[in-house]
Image (tube, rainbow, N blue to C red):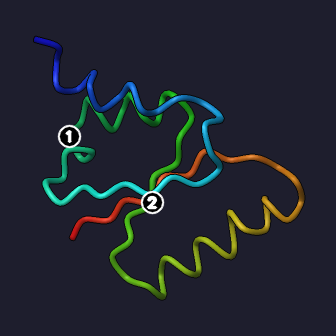
Amino acid sequence: MADWRETILKHFKKNISRLTLVSDPDELLAEERILTEIKDRGFDLIPYEDSIAFRFAYESKYRSMWDQGRTTDLVVVLRS
């Protein structure tokens, strides 16, 4: 049987999409080894917990980058 971490990590491929939404109600992405590997692959993770804080981070950092034609690998993590 494959390691459960590898089953998750196989979906995180560089330049697959500039924005990825992940539903993680069990907080599997918060596990240290998973989180480290995702970040090592160049992804930024932002939890969607507070709509105001999320909107500020999204607009000030990521949307402005996209407007300039730059690429990102952003993962928005929904916990509920």
- The mark nearer the N terminus, 1 or 2, is 1
The answer to whether 79 appears left or right of 37 in the picture is: left
Task: Return the residue nearer the eye: 22 or 44.
Answer: 22
Give amino acid for label 2.
Val
Classify 10 Å Cα crowding around label 1: few (below 14), some (14-19), many (20 and above). few
Q: Which residue extends farthest top?
A: 1
Residue drawn at x 23%, y 26% as measured from the top left: 5
Instruction: Name the residue nearer the viewer: 10 or 77.
Output: 10
| Residue at the spot 62% in from the left edge and 45% down from the top edge | 17
Mark 1 or 2: in front is: 2
**Quarter holding the N terminus?**
top left
Crowdedness of circle 2 by 10 Å Cα count: few (<14), some, many (20+)? some
Which residue is found at the position 26% from the left and 25% from the top?
Answer: 7
Is residue 60 found left or right of 45 in the rendered image? right
Q: Position of residue 77 (x, y in %)?
A: 37, 59
The correct choice, above or below, for 54 with respect to 31 in the image is below
Gap between marks 1 and 2, in whole Å?
Answer: 16 Å
- Identified at 67% across, 76% down, the residue is 59
Q: Residue furthest bottom?
A: 52
Residue 76 in percent (x, y) is at 45, 60
Above or below, 50 relative to 73: below
Q: Which residue is mark 1?
A: 31
Residue on which disc 2 sits: 76
Disc 2 secondary structure class: strand
Give the camera-side residue of 54 and 11.
Answer: 11
Q: Position of residue 60 (x, y in %)?
A: 69, 74
Looking at numbered disc 1 in the image, what kind of residue is underneath it?
Answer: Glu
Direction front: furthest residue:
1
Place of residue 47 in the rendered image (x, y in percent of width and height, measured from the top left): 38, 64
Callout 1: helix, strand or loop? loop
